[in-house]
């Protein structure tokens, strides 16, 4: 009796919660690249716009009811995820962010190759006893990850300092330089802000409205910016739990979440992200790909994401409104410097943060973990877009 040959393509199961913001964009880009490379891609995530986009791209989407934060619902979430894993029978599981990393590692417990990608450490997001519990879990859960993938060397160093005994790989975030590319800024501004004169200095902040992204610090700095740059306008793009706490003024507009932030980057004179913590934020990479300079706080991943020419002008300490105001005002007042920095930023993204480089590095990591066993064929075959590449790895044991 004829038996069919074993499937040569790997079955990859991505787990993600959250389903918005930078994590969702990373998962979406990675899934599309892997589908193009011929992998069988399944994503377990809550019902969301991300689930719809992944399904439209050709991924097998399994709806996984899960809240963003751990709580009493965790036991049920783990049981539901266990059923998904048993049904999909993946060759490799890739868990994104703290919640999916928690549930996924509890389900799989290292029985198949497991990649955990924190996308910024959970214990930095909370304080007190909650932070201690989150750190204790990350130390324990590291044994069930065959690789912990950090998006910056700084993120990895934070984990090492915290006592997490991980088998580390560093794969910097990337963006699509064709989707995020320079375009006519005045036209973009006219379409988005038809009531705002073209000569009004415009700063834009794109990010989830939450404590992590630090929009409250930017608002605290904005009056000082306006004192030096009269008439300057700040636009906050995004939504989130802090929306009702942020108090805009006539000089500040909240426009909510948007399906595509690229027009806002192009409309801006300057893009600002005053985060309290990150792994490596995507919004500054996207803005630089659009040829815009950025001002960012010197948290994990920020320094690594900037070309050296931008660092003296664009890095400020976190949670210091005066330093933030100084950097923002100085750049808003210097159009030639902004143009020069924007050109250098675009070149840096194309050379160092193309999403295709990121996908290729992840493919190389998968090949290493899968070895010569089932599903080892990664990133090859007709139509494959991810080529072999090296990824930076260090093992702490």
Image (cartoon, helix red, strand yellow):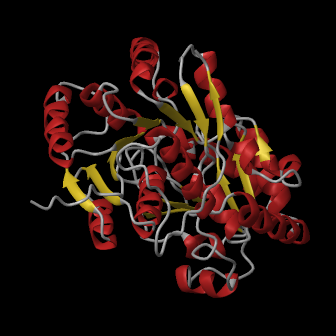
Q: Is residue 276 visible?
A: no
Q: Residue furthest left?
A: 1
Pick the front one: 201 or 317: 317
Looking at the image, is 160 positioned above or below residue 94?
Answer: above
**Up-down relation of residue 53 to residue 89 (above or below):** below
Residue 57 location, x and y as percent?
34, 71
Question: Which residue is at 44% across, 12% downward?
Answer: 132
Where residue 121 appears, as percent x and y from the top left, is 51, 30
Query: How far across and down, in percent of the image, does residue 197 sit?
Result: 67, 82
Q: Nearer the viewer, residue 113 or 83?
A: 113
Residue 326 in the image, given as x and y percentages of width and height: 81, 47
Left or right: residue 8 versus residue 394 is left
Q: How many marks?
A: 0
- Extreme residue toward the front, this view: 1
In depth, the one of 262 and 92 nearer the eye is: 92
Residue at the image point whose x is 85% and y is 56% from the top:
330
Which quadrant of the rendered structure holds the C terminus? top right
């Amino acid at each position: 009796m004829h038996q069919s040959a074993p499937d040569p393509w790997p079955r990859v199961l991505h787990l993600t919660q959250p389903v918005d913001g930078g994590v969702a964009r990373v998962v979406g880009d990675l899934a599309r690249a892997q589908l193009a490379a011929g992998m069988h891609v399944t994503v377990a995530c809550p019902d969301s716009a991300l689930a719809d986009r992944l399904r439209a791209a050709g991924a097998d989407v399994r709806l996984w009811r899960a809240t963003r934060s751990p709580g009493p619902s965790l036991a049920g979430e783990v049981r539901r995820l266990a059923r998904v894993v048993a049904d999909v029978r993946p060759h490799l599981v890739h868990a994104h962010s703290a919640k999916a990393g928690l549930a996924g590692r509890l389900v799989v417990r290292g029985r198949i190759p497991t990649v955990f990608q924190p996308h910024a450490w959970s214990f930095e997001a909370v304080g007190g006893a909650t932070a201690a519990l989150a750190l204790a879990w990350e130390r324990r859960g590291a044994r069930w990850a065959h690789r912990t993938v950090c998006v910056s060397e700084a993120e990895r160093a934070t984990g090492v300092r915290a006592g997490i005994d991980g088998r580390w790989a560093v794969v910097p975030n990337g963006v699509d330089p064709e989707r995020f590319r320079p375009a006519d800024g005045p036209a973009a501004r006219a379409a988005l802000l038809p009531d705002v004169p073209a000569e009004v200095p415009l700063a834009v902040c794109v990010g989830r409205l939450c404590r992590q992204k630090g929009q409250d610090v930017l608002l605290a700095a904005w009056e000082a910016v306006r004192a030096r740059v009269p008439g300057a306008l700040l636009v906050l793009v995004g939504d989130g739990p802090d929306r009702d706490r942020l108090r805009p003024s006539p000089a500040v507009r909240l426009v909510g979440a948007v399906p595509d932030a690229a027009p806002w980057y192009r409309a801006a004179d300057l893009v600002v992200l005053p985060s309290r913590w990150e792994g490596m934020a995507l919004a500054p990479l996207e803005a630089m790909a659009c040829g815009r300079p950025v001002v960012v706080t010197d948290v994990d991943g920020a320094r690594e994401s900037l070309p050296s020419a931008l660092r003296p002008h664009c890095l400020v300490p976190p949670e210091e409104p005066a330093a933030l105001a100084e950097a923002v005002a100085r750049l808003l007042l210097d159009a030639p410097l902004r143009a020069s920095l924007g050109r250098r930023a675009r070149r840096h993204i194309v050379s160092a943060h193309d999403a295709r480089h990121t996908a290729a590095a992840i493919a190389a990591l998968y090949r290493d973990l899968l070895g010569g066993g089932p599903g080892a064929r990664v990133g090859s075959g007709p139509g494959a877009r991810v080529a072999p590449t090296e990824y930076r790895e260090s093992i702490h044991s």
